[in-house]
Image: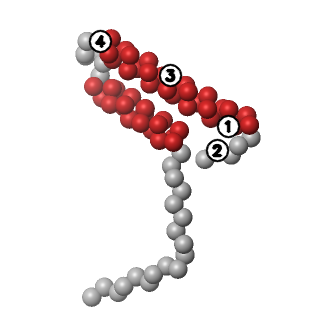
Amino acid sequence: MPAKKAVSSKTHFHIPKDPLRVKSEEIQVRHEGRSKRSLKKLEVTNDMLYELLSDILEKQSILEQRMEQYARGKPLN
């Protein structure tokens, strides 16, 4: 019979994920999905272009927010 693990007396602190990082990761996943579909083989539609441009603008917004945080001297997560 396996030995039981000792219960740790240390307190566990949950640190929430940075919302900007989460959003950036979501954009990256969408980008990788489009890369796998290989847009060269597909007909490019207005919806695809809109999605691409929206992702670019969202990423730009995230980067601008990070730059503002850095300029104000706030620590980055």
The residue tagged 3 is: 57
Secondary element under disc 4, as helix, strand or loop, is loop
Three-letter code, disc 4: Thr
Task: Tell me whether circle 1 and circle 4 mark residues in contact (CB < 8 Å).
Answer: no
Nearest to N terminus: mark 2 or mark 4: 4
The circle drawn on residue 45 is: 4
Task: Tell me whether circle 4 and circle 3 mark residues in contact (CB < 8 Å).
Answer: no
Nearest to N terminus: mark 1 or mark 2: 1
The residue tagged 1 is: 69
Nearest to N terminus: mark 1 or mark 4: 4
Secondary element under disc 2, as helix, strand or loop, is loop
- Quarter of the figure with residue 54: top left
Q: CA distance from mark 1 to mark 3?
A: 18 Å
Three-letter code, disc 1: Gln
Picture residue at 33% right of the left edge, 17% below the top: 48
Q: Is residue 76 left or right of residue 33?
A: right
The circle drawn on residue 76 is: 2
